[in-house]
């Protein structure tokens, strides 16, 4: 994560040091100001805005090295997180396989998943198709066609028909 801007980065000394590091043509390009305004800042006729100093800081080698270091640290943290989560996922899958092996007695809510089978799209497709799983995870019923409604008119009932 990129840190906040340096709090002590302001004033003409910092501006001159950063212009020397970046170079005047690149500084004019980064700041996007006219050359006359840039000259006024260097001659101390007009105070240098802090935003101009910070823009040059992030374009200088110091700001770039800070960004690179933050990026490398974040990348290392994310790689460690991916490794830890992959290991945890492997351990949990092994636990699920052990529990499923131990409970093969065929209860009503038996597994719909077999270890090693992809759990995402296949399980969703089976649920959408309304397949039912048997005691050992074998499908007992084939998917049914969707119910087709007939277009019958409802019967008319005369509520005011006299009783006999």
Image (cartoon, rainbow, N blue to C red):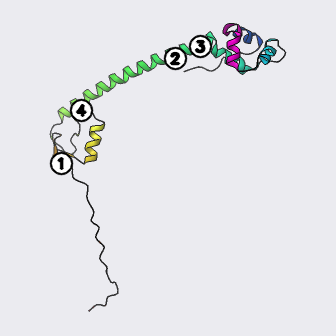
Label 4 and label 3: CA atoms lie apart by 46 Å
Left or right of 63 in this view: 88:
left
Mark 4 vs mark 3, foreground winner is 3
Residue at 49%, 14% in the rendered image: 72
Mark 2 vs mark 3, foreground winner is 3
Q: Which residues are magenta?
A: 19-33
Where does residue 32 sit, x and y in percent of width and height?
A: 71, 21
Label 1 and label 3: CA atoms lie apart by 62 Å
Q: Name the mark on residue 142.
A: 1
Residue at 57%, 20% in the rendered image: 2
Quadrant in the picture for the N terminus? top right
Residue placed most toward the observer, 19 or 13: 19
Crowdedness of circle 4 by 10 Å Cα count: few (<14), some, many (20+)?
Answer: few
Where does residue 154 sit, x and y in percent of width and height?
A: 30, 73
Residue identifier under label 4: 117
- Dot 4 or dot 3: first in sequence order is 3
- Dot 2 or dot 4: first in sequence order is 2
Residue placed most toward the observer, 135 or 107: 135
């Amino acid at each position: 994560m990129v840190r906040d801007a340096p709090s002590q980065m302001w004033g003409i000394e910092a501006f001159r040091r950063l212009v020397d590091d970046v170079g005047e043509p690149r500084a004019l390009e980064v700041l996007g100001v006219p050359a006359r305004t840039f000259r006024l800042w260097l001659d101390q006729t007009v105070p240098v805005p802090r935003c101009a100093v910070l823009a040059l800081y992030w374009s200088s080698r110091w700001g770039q090295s800070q960004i690179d270091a933050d990026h490398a640290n974040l990348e290392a943290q994310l790689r460690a997180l991916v490794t830890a989560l992959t290991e945890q996922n492997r351990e949990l899958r092994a636990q699920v396989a052990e529990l499923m092996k131990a409970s093969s007695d065929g209860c009503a809510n038996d597994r719909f998943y077999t270890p090693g089978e992809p759990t995402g799209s296949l399980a969703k497709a089976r649920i959408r198709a309304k397949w039912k799983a048997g005691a050992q995870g074998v499908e007992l019923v084939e998917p049914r066609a969707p119910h087709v409604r007939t277009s019958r008119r409802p019967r008319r009932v005369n509520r005011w028909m006299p009783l006999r």
